[in-house]
Amino acid sequence: MAECATAIDVVDCEDLLDLAEQEVLRKRRYGRPCTMAVFDPDHWDAVTRDQALGTVSDALRVIGVLAGQVVRDVDVVARIHDEAFAVLLPETEMEGGLCVGERLCWAVDGVRLNAKSEKSPLTLSVGIAEAHDGTLTASELFARAIAARDLARLQGGNRVMIA
């Protein structure tokens, strides 16, 4: 994981959760907003079935790079599992998180894994969760964002859902 994370200039899941824990504590102590986005490509199994391993790895790098271009310098992009990513958005309320999620979808929408083929355009399912006064841990925030991402996927993908 560390090698892949370095290759696409993102942190790993453990580092993300450590940073998110600090933001959740800041939210509880000072009332500062914090939001998390979790996203992954839609229909990834079908998309990758016809692609070479190098093409798939390149696609994940492209998603990581595009995510890094969409967010602010203070935001943290992480590769959390296989093809899944997350973004920690400190000092960001739900509305701002929703905007980031939409920009992620727009940035990736239509990227093709194989320039010679019309097959396999990439789209994303994105889940957004904001830490609220009852949020006790980063893991809880993370789980809510994952649940929203799963709902986006169930509704056909290429969309952003909020928790």
Image (cartoon, helix red, strand yellow):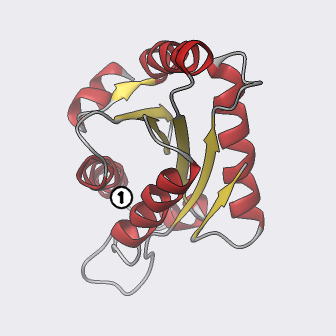
Q: Closer to the camera, 2 or 46?
A: 2
Which residue type carries mark 1?
Ala
Please state if 150 lies on the left or on the right of 65 as rendered: right
Q: Residue at x 27, y 46 (%)?
A: 68
Circle 1 crowding by C-alpha within 10 Å: few under 14, some 14–19, many from 20: few
Could you say where residue 71 lies in the image, as x and y percent from the top left? 31, 48
* Residue 21 higher or lower than 134, as above or below: above
**Numbered circles on residues, count:** 1
Q: Which residue is mark 1?
A: 52
Could you say where residue 65 lies in the image, as x and y percent from the top left? 25, 50
* Residue 17 higher or lower than 109, as above or below: above
Q: Residue at x 45, y 22 (%)?
A: 16
Which residue is at the far front? Answer: 30
Element marked by disc 1: loop
Could you say where residue 13 lies in the image, as x and y percent from the top left? 48, 23
| Quarter of the image where one finds residue 126 | bottom right
Q: Residue at x 57, y 19 (%)?
A: 24
* Residue 132 higher or lower than 69, as above or below: above
Q: Where, quadrant-wise, is the N terminus in this rendering?
A: top left
